[in-house]
Image: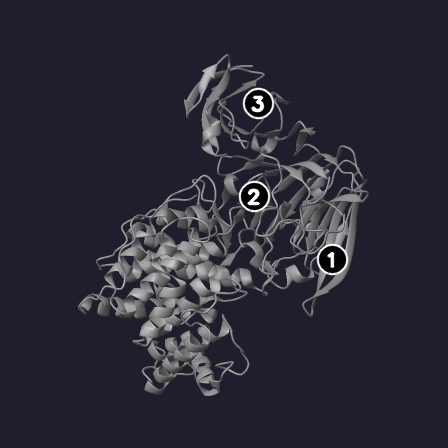
Amino acid sequence: MAGTVGAVVPMGVAHTPDDTFVRLRRRWREVTAGPVSGQGRDPAAGPAGALGQAAARHHATMAPGPSSLWPDQPFPSFMATPRRLRTMAQAYVVEGTGLTGDPALARAVAEGVGHYRRHVYATGAQASGNWWHWAIGVPKALLDAAVLTDMHTPALAAAVDHFVPPSRLARYSGTSTAANRVDLCLVTLLRAMLDDDHGRAELAVSALSPVFRTVSEGDGFYRDGSFIQHSYVPYQGAYGVTLLSGLATLYAVLRGSPWEIADRSLFAMVERSYAPFVRDGACMDLVRGRGVGRRPFGDHERGREIAAAVLLLGESAPAGQRARWQAMVKGWAERETYRPMLEHAEPAFHARLSAVMADDAVPAAPEPVGHRLLPMSARAVHRGPGWCAALSMASYRIGHYEHGNGENQRGWHTGSGLLYWWAEGHGDQYSDSFWPTVDPYRLPGTTVSTRRLPDGAGAGWGDTRTPWRWVGGATDGTYAAVGQHLSGLESTMEAFKSWFFLDDAVVCLGAGITGQDGTPVETVVDNRRTAARLTTGGDWAHLDGHGGYLVPGGQALRTLRERRSGDEVSRDYVTLWLDHGVDPRSAAYVYALLPGASRERTRARAADRGWLRVLANTARLQAVHVPALGLTAACFWNAGTAGDLTASAPCAVLVRGRPDGSATVSVADPRRDLDELSLTWDRPVAEVLHGDAVLAGGGLVFDRLGVLEGASVTVTVRFGRE
């Protein structure tokens, strides 16, 4: 999406110094660095002490030379050198570091910034390589260090003006959208603080306005809560964190200033866009793009950043929202046992989180139970009692995966129906070196051709989309029917995959599985990073401490136990899969996942032939009926009939019957092109009790589903007598 942000305010006009920017710089220090209460007595303790130790180390080893500021970081050192200078600046202002207010440290920061500016970030230098370093990464860190230490540096201002001129914010397009736009505005505001430039401060805030608009394509927030960056990649857990953190900072810093931000539309996205993808303090990998394999426990690190941003944003939110967010973050922190938040919090976040954790009036919110489907980003998250599952798909809008800058070169199949799941006690399942050690051809839940692919197969930066529009589903907020018309990456493989999310199970169906690559096609029931005992019982299997699997109908479940290595680490895996053979024609599968189930419960469920009825499993229709729940769920790839339900067009449907003869009916148009949909049953609908549907011919008619961007519509009806 492109658009003009308005006339650029003339820059560089001298202003008489006043208290406005004095207060703004003070507020920046309070918000971004912040005191750590109760830690001043012992400089070696806590995050302030760790910050002080790092700054002291950087100060002691700084050795300016013609080709480096630190001997171990030869220029250009776009990341490490500016960040070390910012760390030193933070230690100068944060209480309890042992270096607070140390003039020698401030002089060293000024010397280092000047040295780096002369040798690397110099006015007129050629901005080679990644644009981000020159326009965001380097100036953001150097300007932050300058503002924290109250440094007056006209030369740095001139360099920033060269690489980030006001014209960079003139149009909302290219590399100046969503999270990148927020970062560019932050850089512009920090630049304004250097010399009390009112024009630049005004521009920094006015140029944010496109970020707050919901979009229907390209980068930004969508009506369903999706967040996209790089046009095709769901990114709440990376670029989205940057956006949330940056805006939370701007709201807090500018509050009460002439440039206070009035737009509050971001606040709704905390619970709609971010919270669904945080489980027990960790941010799920399916919204972290190419960064999933950067380092172990990166998902916990990103979750911590989201928590920090939410608490900071809460300071600018209405009391009701602030209370909910504090309770939510407190719940995350209490359940985060793998990388405890307080132990790994930076000083400002540590202060905020400590206050919340110590406040008995703030309850710790539990993990919610229910389903969140984000059709515009082909993502779904389902929470049952004590377990959670998340689904990653690809579509004509969303890529199979993103690679770029040499990262995530083997994430080929993460959009092929990758089904993440967590039972109690397994919050590190995908955190502890999963990505460098897992077999990239056997990701859990996926259906793939085993054709060998080169590293970085497909276009870079996420443009690895499929041609298919039917990707999404219907949900009533508790249960869901989700489907994906799948094409393999750089493969002839095609499949129709459906997932039916229940209270204690995920039922998985596949049909129409074909391929002509000359290689086998497989559906991976699971690939767990564990050495736990696996028990198989014919049409079921159980993995101790994890859960159970049902594989009915005589399907041959294959298993493998192996130890895999990567990035100088090794991990144990248990893999379960179904082999569809070489170049299959209309192959199919049915299996169910029982997260957290015991061996006895798994065996009992396998023996209960009546708990689930598969009504259809073809390339035209996939549907199930669960009698105990009164639930019928279907993915209609074409118009058709499932049990007693008939749909006039492709759609997803979820029906839940009630003992009183009423039912809720949830429908959606994943393809986003229906003007009208008719649903009929073997018995007539007598009355629409609630919701937007028309009673016609004993059935229901839904109008204009296509304009809802794949969102579900739920109505309550009363059936007539059979």
- Frontmost residue, 371 versus 100: 100
Which residue is painted at 46% across and 16% down in the image? 695
Q: Position of residue 663 (x, y in %)?
A: 49, 26
Crowding at label 3, few (<14), some or many (≥20) Cα neighbours within 10 Å? Answer: some
Q: Relative to residue 88, is residue 531 drawn left or right?
A: right
Q: Which mark is residue 184?
A: none
Nearer to us: label 1 or label 3: 3
Which residue is painted at 39% across and 72% down in the image? 142
Q: In the figure, 515 relative to 46: above or below?
A: above
- Frontmost residue, 58 versus 99: 58
- Spatial CA span between label 1 and label 2: 37 Å
Q: Which mark is residue 533?
A: 1
Under circle 2, the secondary element is: loop
Three-letter amino acid code at disc 3?
Ala
**Mark 2 sits on what residue?**
398
Q: Position of residue 263 (x, y in %)?
A: 30, 48
Three-letter amino acid code at disc 2?
Ile
**Mark 3 sits on what residue?**
649
